Image (cartoon, grey):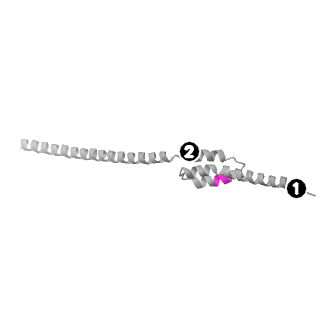
């Protein structure tokens, strides 16, 4: 009933379908691999969204690729150093503000002392 060529054809179809399914799954794993390679903080979310995209007829896959490539570890290090620089600058400004406030308090104290001295001198001159 079935010839050898029918069985060979069936075997070829099974292999082709398996390779095709494996290829689709492997392609959908590319953004996750990129994210892991770049130490992306959302690598798990990218992997989960890749599986969701697989069942949504690949609608999210291009966005996953962009999401995986968008993260750059060297920029994160730069952001960290920029934050440290800003913290140092804020500390310097706080010291300047404190010094200005102290100077203002000293000026008020000196002016009140000067007015008291001048008032005492006026009282002594009147007496």
Secondary element type, mark 2: helix
Residue 76 shown left or right of residue 99 in the figure: right
Spatial separation of the CA atoms under disc 1 and disc 2: 53 Å
Q: Look at 25% across and 44% down and name the residue there.
A: 104
**Dot 1, how many residues are within 10 Å of its Cα: few (below 14), some (14-19), or many (20+)?**
few
Which of the 4 quarters of the picture holds residue 6?
A: bottom right
> Residue 12: horizontal and vertical position, in percent?
80, 52
In magenta stretch: residue 51: yes
Please state the horizontal and vertical placement of residue 16, each as a whole percent of the image. 77, 51
Picture coordinates of residue 103, whole percent (x, y): 24, 44
Q: In percent of the image, x 87 and y 53: which residue is there?
A: 5
Position of the N terminus by quadrant:
bottom right
The residue where tag 2 is placed is 70
Judge whether residue 93 is colored magenta: no
- For the point 11% across and 45% down, the residue is 120
Q: Which residues are magenta?
A: 48-52
Q: Secondary structure at mark 1?
A: helix
N-terminal of the pair, mark 1 or mark 2, is 1
Q: Position of 24 compared to 41: left or right?
A: right
Q: How many marks?
A: 2
Prevalent SS, magenta region: helix
């Amino acid at each position: 009933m079935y010839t050898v060529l029918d069985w060979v054809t069936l075997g070829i179809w099974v292999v082709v379908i398996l390779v095709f399914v494996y290829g689709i799954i492997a392609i959908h794993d590319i953004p996750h691999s990129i994210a892991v390679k770049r130490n992306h903080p959302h690598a798990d979310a990218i992997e989960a969204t890749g599986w969701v995209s697989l069942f949504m007829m690949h609608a999210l896959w291009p966005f996953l690729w962009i999401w995986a490539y968008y993260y750059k570890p060297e920029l994160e290090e730069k952001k960290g150093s920029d934050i440290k620089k800003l913290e140092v600058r804020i500390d310097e400004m706080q010291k300047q503000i404190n010094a200005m406030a102290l100077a203002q308090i000293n000026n008020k104290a000196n002016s009140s002392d000067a007015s008291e001295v001048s008032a005492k001198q006026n009282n002594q001159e009147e007496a």
